[in-house]
Image (cartoon, grey):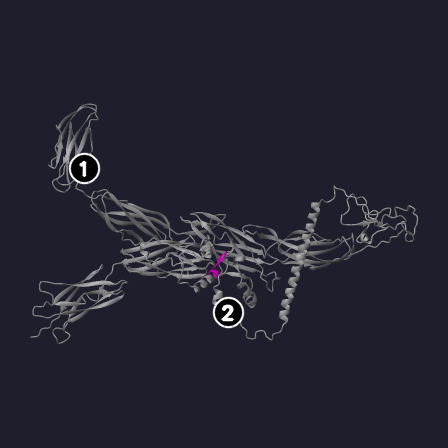
Amino acid sequence: MRVTPSEVKFLDALAGRVYRLPVTVHNLGRSNQKIRFQEPVKPQFKLILTSVDKALASGLQTTAVVEYHPDKNEDMCDQLLISVGNKTIEIPLIGLIPSCQLEIEPEVNFGTLVACSKVYCKEISIINHGSVPGIFKTEYQGQLPIVIFPTSGVVKPKSSMVIKVDFCADQPIVVNELAKVSLQDRPDIFLNIRACVVEQIIELLNINNDRKLECISFGSVFFGTSKIERALLYNNSPEPINWVAIMQDDSVGEELGTNIKQRTDVALNNLAYLRKIKSIDITTIISCVPNEGRLLPYQKILITFCFSPKLIIDGQKNDPTHRQDYAVFLRFESVGTKDGFLRDDNQIIKSDSFQKVELALTGSGLPVLLQFDPGRVLTFAPCFMGGHSEIHCVMQNRSKSLPLMYHFKKTAHFKIDPQKGKIDEGCMQNVTCSFIPHQVGVFKVKQFIEIIGSVADENLQSSSLKPFHQIYLYFNSVCKPSTKKVVMKVNPGLSPLVSNPTGQFVVKDLVQYKNHAPVAMLQSTMTHIHNHKIKKELIKGALIAFPNDRAASIRSGEDHKNFRTIFTKIPRYNYVDPDFAYTKFEKIEKKSHEKYYAEYIKYLRNVRLQKEARRKCIYSYNDIDIGLHPASGLKSPTVSEVEMEEELSSAQCWIKHNQLLCTRNIAFKETKSLRRKVLKGLKSDPSTPHEKHDCSLILTPKQIYQVIVGPSVLNFGDVCANSTNTHLLHIINMLPIHILIQLDVSLEELQKTNQFSYVIPPTTSTCISMIFESPTIGKFWKSFTFTVNNMPGGHILVMAVVLPVRLELSSNELILRPQGFLVKSCFRGTVRMYNRQNYFVKFKWQPINTGKGMAFSIRPAKGTVEPYSSLECEVAWQPGFDSPERGEFILHVSEGNTLTLKCLAHVMTSF
């Protein structure tokens, strides 16, 4: 047999009404069954059925109706018995009056959070399945920053109410807290609040074994070369972070260009060198790429560190022991709300919300010390063209730490063997220098030697072998001409039998030819056979044409040149070959090229002449004596405030992409911005084109780091409900542009703040008055975010403890003693009320009248006590025959506490 339902429940039953529910019995067996229904005991329950005995065939079912008609509003129960053979089935009958049925989720799990003093909120619902409103109440008595709101309320029938659980993740901890929840008509239950708060850890890991990295040693490198090391930056937290690398150039223990192996007294005596190393910009020597960015949860990125030392001129630069040692500290820090000088040591939250990691970087720079023996000036023995002379010299690498690679640049008429090579530390290399002249003359040349090493590329992430230093030698020698006696013989012909293309006589081939062609001798000056009538204008500019000036050549002559024969002075025939001649376009193009280079050379000459004239002009001014003596009391003019506050252009003030931020520069910018305070007239939106352009720029983490918004915690402390409280929020803009700060405040308690958007001018600071007012009593922990040029900048935590107004009495019992002789005025006393909070308090005294009457009075009977002040009330007793000597007053504080003052009149009787 199967009976459905197994329990008959009449919900929301009211007195005077009738309710019915069916009960079905189903025969699941293979044979017929006889069943019997028994009537409920209580008269409020009635079984409606034609016959209590039923015969039920296999597979069939029967239905009975239970009727419930309560006579009063209270819960009632009974049971319906169904007999099947020897077995009896009990069906509970329950009648319930209308009630609430509240239900709440048993757990709130925040998951894994980062300890950054940010308030996280989770919502749960209290559901009322009943037909009448239900009351609930929550209470958390732990010590963690957990706030449940609302703490009490009423849930309407067939609806739900959202409960917010706020948790401030201020320190690493595993949270497993219980909050007591009281639900109407149900026993108390506990709400389990869970969270795992971890630190926001930035770690530097070794690239080879993923171990934590604390120091990178670059070792020793030559000045002008670079050494590159790499590491992994790891975000070991469940939230993404924006990070930036900062060079700590003002930290204790740093070394900038000092020689740590030098004696202290020797180093202190070189004051000029000490002054130079103090002004070193360490960011030009040590670089980090990338030095800003965004890391996703548990992400690793590759960081490249480059060490490129530069030689600072010192009197001992040629000393093999000279060195410049560097030890600096680089900090990797997340970008967000920074307290800076605004840190409050009395604030409750002490955790460092923005974790950082520090890396030590060490390295040494060494000079190139290459010594030549017999010296840098080499004078070779004179020789003839075709001969050569040699000098053997020795190169010594005086560096005791680093090998040296060299390369001799090619120089005409000289040869070096070997031309390039490598010299180990402290070793020598034999070099043969040869003078092989190819022309006659005196030679004085510089032989450059390139020192090759690893030099960083422009991206500072890789390096290649390049020349980084040059040393030169002076080579001197003479090539003498060789003399040979030549016997000249007359060639009676018009031209030599053997000649070069221009008809020049060839001396060395003269001996081979001894037979010469005969020729008739004629005095050409005495004859007139070659005289032609030629105009003198045609002869001007004409060139003499030798008989064989174009021998063995098919090239055509130039159009602008006019050739004439030697004797007849007639124009020579000019052959033009179209295959070799210039076209018109080529002639124009050639002429334009010639004109372009001629103008370029002329321009360079004019620039040089202008520089010389300017230099002469300056010298002429300096030569004028105006009667002033050096150091005669003249002082340099001081920079005015207006000049200091002039805005520099953005292009001049931006930090280069690969340049590191340094703490000394940031401190200087912060001090400068603090001196330029803007307290009035701040715009809520950019209006000018310049402001709109600046506020639309997308800022990088390195730039957002230079905007300080703090303190990170606005702690209003203990405040009264409905009281107005003010706390200053400081903004420092160290950037050379306007920025738009927007506070994303959706908290009702801060809505009385005048403005939530500000345009901050370049390199200025300001203060914002944040106004807090809350009508809700209890702890307040909320946070809001802010943006810089619409880029996330961080968050601000708002803390307060909202208390009800209250008064304190100087005494809860007052004894009145006679202080004069007048009966009506001798029994008087005073009691003082203290308001130790920040809100005015309204009060009223209420006398308690007993059966014997009231003989005490108090003034003032009502009034107001100002914040952080007190008020004195006077109590008087009116003596009489039946005046009671005791009395009480109740002090009612509006929306606050209630106190009782007992009064006693001390009457002395005499007999």
Residue 9 sits in quarter? top left
Looking at the image, residue 533 sits to the left or right of residue 796; the answer is right
Determine crowd level at label 1: few under 14, some 14-19, many 20+ residues with C-alpha closer than 10 A.
some
Question: Tag 2, which secondary structure?
Answer: loop
Position of residue 460 in the picture relative to residue 516 (left or right): left
Q: Is residue 645 above or below residue 485?
A: below
Q: How many marks?
A: 2
Q: Contact (CB < 8 A) between labels 2 and 1?
A: no
Q: Can you identify the residue that label 2 sits on?
A: 638
Quick one: quadrant of the N terminus?
A: top left
Q: Secondary structure at mark 1?
A: strand
The answer to whether one can see residue 137 in this image is: no
User: On the image, numbered disc 1 is attached to which residue?
Assistant: 9
User: Mark 2: which amino acid?
Assistant: Thr
Q: Is residue 876 among what the camera can see? A: yes
Query: Which residue occupies the extreme bottom position in the image?
Result: 821
Horizontal side, residue 311 vs residue 731: left or right: right
Choose between 387 and 816: the one closer to the eye: 816
In the rendering, at what x and y percent does residue 692 appear?
A: 45, 55
Amino acid type, label 1: Lys
| Residue 804 belongs to magenta span | no
Residue 124 percent location from the top left of the image: 29, 46
The magenta-colored residue range is 660-666
Point out residue 376 in the picture as x, y percentages from the top left corner.
69, 59
